[in-house]
Amino acid sequence: MLAIETKDLTKRYKDKTAVNGINLKINQGELFALLGTNGAGKTTTIKMLSTLIIPTDGQIKINGSDIEKDRQKIKKILNVSPQETAIAPNLSVKENLEFMAGVYQIRNKKEKTDELIKSFNLDQVLNQKAKTLSGGWQRKVSIAISLINEPEILFLDEPTLGLDVIARKELWSVIEKLKGKVTIILTTHYMEEAEHLSDRIGIMAKGNLIATGTSRELIEKTGAENFEDAFVKIATGGEL
Amino acid sequence: MRTLNFAKRNFKEISRDPLSLIFAVILPLFLLFIFQQFDIPNESYKLENFTPGIVIFGFSFITMFTAMLISKDRTTSLLIRLGVSPMRPMEYILGYMLSIVPVILVQNILFFILAIILGLEFSINIIFSIGLSVVIAILFIAAGIIIGSISSEKASSGISSILVQLVCFTSGMYFPREILGKFFGTLCEYLPFESCLAILKGVMNNNTESIEMRNIIIFLIYTVVLLAVSVIVFKRKMVSDNN
Ligand SMILES: Nc1ncnc2c1ncn2[C@@H]1O[C@H](COP(=O)(O)OP(=O)(O)OP(=O)(O)O)[C@@H](O)[C@H]1O
Ligand SMILES: [Mg+2]
């Protein structure tokens, strides 16, 4: 079954079309990287797919259910790590995890938070107020929180932005462990990240989904030397 | 349960950023103390009248307080995260309300302790009026939710301070309506603050005959309408802020 299916998905703001009729099919357990230049419409697409904003036009099916009709049910099985770090500033890291566990009504709260503390190495900052953490640590906490409800579908909007090399590699390994079990939609501006992690890649430009395929397919299609060059060719329409 | 969970988080946020909290408690306490130091020959300033006035005045800061809490939340991407979660608008609203109840109780208890030290006679009615004030506070919290939902963090403190002024002038806590002139006199009648004070005063002084039917009706209408509007406005904003 498809985890995500969209039909002519569109979002318009006044006279700006942020997302222009995109058709996506993402399989269950697949890691799909959504690439594109600044303002291409990646975040807007994720916001629509994750129930946060309502499309102007088009349809979204999550696990076969219509996002409009089964909104409440769908909300329970997905989660997002937003592009901007999203944590409660005056709560400690531990309290943040517990708070979100409460929001999702997690039953095995203690187990789940302990597990996340372990896989993200949060021990050392556990009792620190979130707003006093460094940017990278806030980001890690924000990502850890998004796994609290063991989502079937996970949206990661530029998860590794601001992370140091080691933290990035650690996050990669967390993501790799989720691969196959969780459907992941990830946006990034780091080409090697998309290439390394993803099963398939979609490239957006000016609100349109202009190419999809594996990194290898996209390289072949453009006749480029490497994936970065392939991306540049596709995203600029071959002008560069 | 989700409501309680959210209320708990709000309460932590509030108590760890205590500046506005201090405002909502210290300023009214200060006024209560200062005005008892002068012997003002006016009924309004007798402790049994002025203390409930201070409670209502303190509630206008609750409006400010709620408005700032919500407008601040709206600026953080935490609301994105919560917007994706299964929380429902009503759970947010109740969660905000519940988290403010402890603040109201702290206010009330401190006000009455000071009033008793200054010479107010303790009676069981004081306990009743503390309970009643939690109900009256709903009106003020709802007003805060509306202000916090429609304005930015900066603007919401400004708009709320208008409400603080209105409470001063139209509740009758400082000035009897007779000396206010025609315009403010009429305003007193149609705004809920005079009624809130009349109800609270009546209960606290075991003088319920002084509460007019008009007071109760006005209070109820305002509470129900503001509550309904707050739910609608918050719900709308919750979607449109993210749109
Ligand atoms: N609320 C909004 N109102 C008006 N325009 C918006 C709104 N949100 C996004 N846009 C516009 O929609 C377009 C797509 O934005 P979006 O945030 O989806 O891009 P993105 O691909 O995530 O970019 P980035 O890589 O910089 O994060 C942009 O031109 C943006 O200005
Ligand atoms: Mg983006």
Image (cartoon, helix red, strand yellow):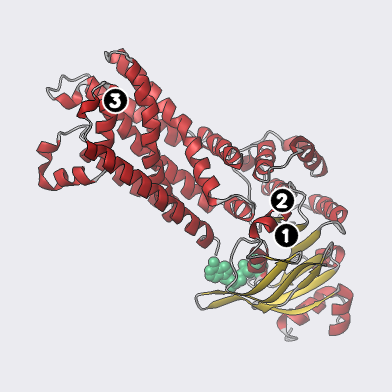
Residue indicated by mark 3: B203
Where in the figure is residue B94, as x and y percent of width and height?
50, 42
Give whichever of A73, B148 is nearer the camera: A73
Where in the figure is residue B201, as x and y percent of width and height?
26, 27
Q: Earlier in the sequence, mark 1 or mark 2?
A: 2
Amino acid at pointer 2: Ser
Q: Is any atom of residue B161 visible in this view?
A: no
For the image, the number of numbered tags is 3
Give whichever of B225, A109 is nearer the camera: B225
Mark 2 packing: few (<14 Cα in 10 Å), some, or many (20+)?
Answer: many
| Quadrant that contains the N terminus of chain B | top right
What SS does tag 1 mark? strand
Q: Are marks 2 and 3 in contact (CB under 8 Å)?
A: no
Mark 3–mark 1 distance (CA, rounded to whole Å): 55 Å
Query: Quadrant of the rendered structure where residue A234 is?
Result: bottom right
Q: Are marks 1 and 2 in contact (CB under 8 Å)?
A: yes
Residue sitting at x 26%, y 21%: B205
B108 left or right, relative to A230: left
Mark 1–mark 2 distance (CA, rounded to whole Å): 9 Å
Mark 2–mark 3 distance (CA, rounded to whole Å): 50 Å
Where in the figure is residue A87, as x and y percent of width and height?
63, 46
Residue indicated by mark 1: A155
Chain of residue at mark 2: A
Residue indicated by mark 2: A146
| Quadrant that contains the C terminus of chain B | bottom right
Do dots 2 and 3 share one subunit?
no
Taking B82 as reference, is B110 above or below it?
Answer: above
Mark 3 packing: few (<14 Cα in 10 Å), some, or many (20+)?
Answer: many
Front of the two marks 3 and 1: 3
A45 left or right, relative to B41: right
